Image: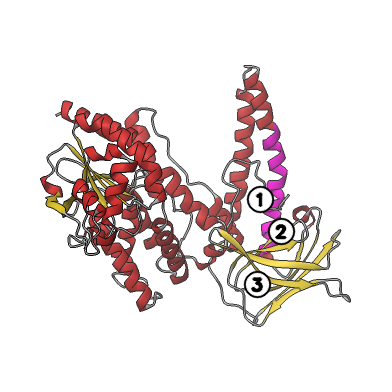
Amino acid sequence: MKYILPTAISFALLIFSPLAPLKAQKDGYEIKVNLENFNSDTLFFGYHFGSKQYIKDTVAIDPTTKEFVFKGDESLDCGIYLVIMPPDNNYFQLLIDDNEQHFSVKTDALNPVKAMKVKDSKENKLFYEYMNFLSLQGPKAQEINEKIKTAKDKKEDSAALEQSLKDINTDVVAYQKGIISKSDGLTSRIIKASMEIDVPEFGTDEESKKNRYYYIKKHWFDNIDLSDPCLLRSSVLQKKIDGYFKNLTPKHPDSIAISLDRVLKLAEPNEETYKYLLIKYLSEYAKSKIVGMDKVYVHLVKNYYKKGKAPWTDEEQLAKIIDDAEKLEPILIGKQAPEISIPELDIDSTLAVMKEENEHKRFKLKEKVALYDIDSLYTIVYIWSPDCGHCKKAMPKMIEVYDKYKDKGVAMYAICHRTYKDTPTCAEYIKNEEPGMLEWLNLNDPYFRSKYNVLYNVKSTPQLYILDHKKEIIMKRVGADQLGEVLEEIIANDKLKEQNK
């Protein structure tokens, strides 16, 4: 078991955070730890950073004093730190601000919260008084929850039990508010950051539910200052932001971009937190496998990196990031697909030329076909290669889907992504391996004169785009196994829109 705030209580007591730094009275830090019932001669000293934890130091026991002493010449950054006890890596937490970095603690490795004694740190004393109070309420709440569950299983009235649970919650909130009202110190701010916001009463009709949602979203960060540097070295910052995106932000790139702008604006006064969040989310949405989320990546690049709001990025890396976003932007969902005009592959002629014993073979291509000239309700732009394993695996399903939907207004604009010397492999594959492709419009631009590879940012195959009759991108990066389902949903939605006009 890791020693952290009790998890049985369900009213936002699971996380805690440090607060803004004060001026240190001494240089460096020195934290003495005396542990009973601990057999190892080594302790680790770690800290939270965003959503992760890191080890800062490892110390051996002093054979004379029987203490573990963590010390350094430079002061610690404020936050929540972890004293980690091998070999099981159970841990207890210490609050570090700039004003109290020279103190000692004595506790029992078997129950560090209950046995904790602190010297020369008022904040850690208060913090562990609070922790012990919660440790008493936790089992009570857990016991009542178990009784409520049993009562519901037996279809018994659990109203009295639920009231008892509310009473515990009331007591805890009153205790929390009592500390907050008496102090604006570190522990007080930790408690405030861990508390849920007060939400007024709303009705049960749909309009009231909507208003309640908007109220919570507006006030979600009321108890937390995201620009506080200490929050970065705690678990509360990332958990609070994660909750905002998970519970209050629609899973749509435009909504996510708006929420990110809000979070970054709140964090911006603290350069380190702002930098951490911007890098984190740029990386997350650059790697996202969710269709359409590349729009969030482009948004971050255009509005932050391109505007000089990421000054820590070196020029070469910045140029690559901006170039990548500029290539992605024209092929985002909702954009007009880039116009291209590509020669149709003359399969029979190419195969005939291959049989000639002529070292200067020239393979024929038909006339160019412009994408915008395809007159269909939907057009699938499919970029593939005959030596691509994923393409080969997907091809039978692609043919099956096309055969099913070709009479429903679906056209296939298939580009074999090969150079001139490899054009024969395109023809061979279609004719001999997947003759069902012969019904498609098969194209090949062996010299890339259309620049489709640049316009559609082709870094790998297969690439798939579904366009509507206006040639706007309505979906992309769909797997062959999901293509039929996606097309069915698109067609059904369009019919519904037509009916509602």
Task: List the single residue furthest toward the right.
Answer: 64
Give the distance between the C-alpha atoms of the residues marked 2 and 3, in whole angstroms: 18 Å
Location of residue 15 with respect to 309 vertically, above or below: above
Q: Nearer the viewer, residue 424 or 419?
A: 424
* Element type where label 3 sits in the image: loop
Residue 316 in the image: state x and y as whole percent: 36, 77
Give the image quarter of residue 39.
bottom right
Residue pointed to by mark 1: 5
Give the distance between the C-alpha atoms of the residues marked 1 and 3, in whole angstroms: 22 Å
| Residue stretch in magenta | 123-143
- Whether residue 290 is visible, yes or no, is no
Residue pointed to by mark 2: 92
Residue pointed to by mark 3: 100
Front tag of 1 and 3: 1
| Magenta span includes 135 | yes
Q: Nearer the viewer, residue 367 or 397?
A: 367
* Mark 1: amino acid: Leu
Residue 314 in the image: state x and y as whole percent: 39, 77
Give the distance between the C-alpha atoms of the residues marked 1 and 2, in whole angstroms: 10 Å
Residue 59 in the image: state x and y as whole percent: 76, 73
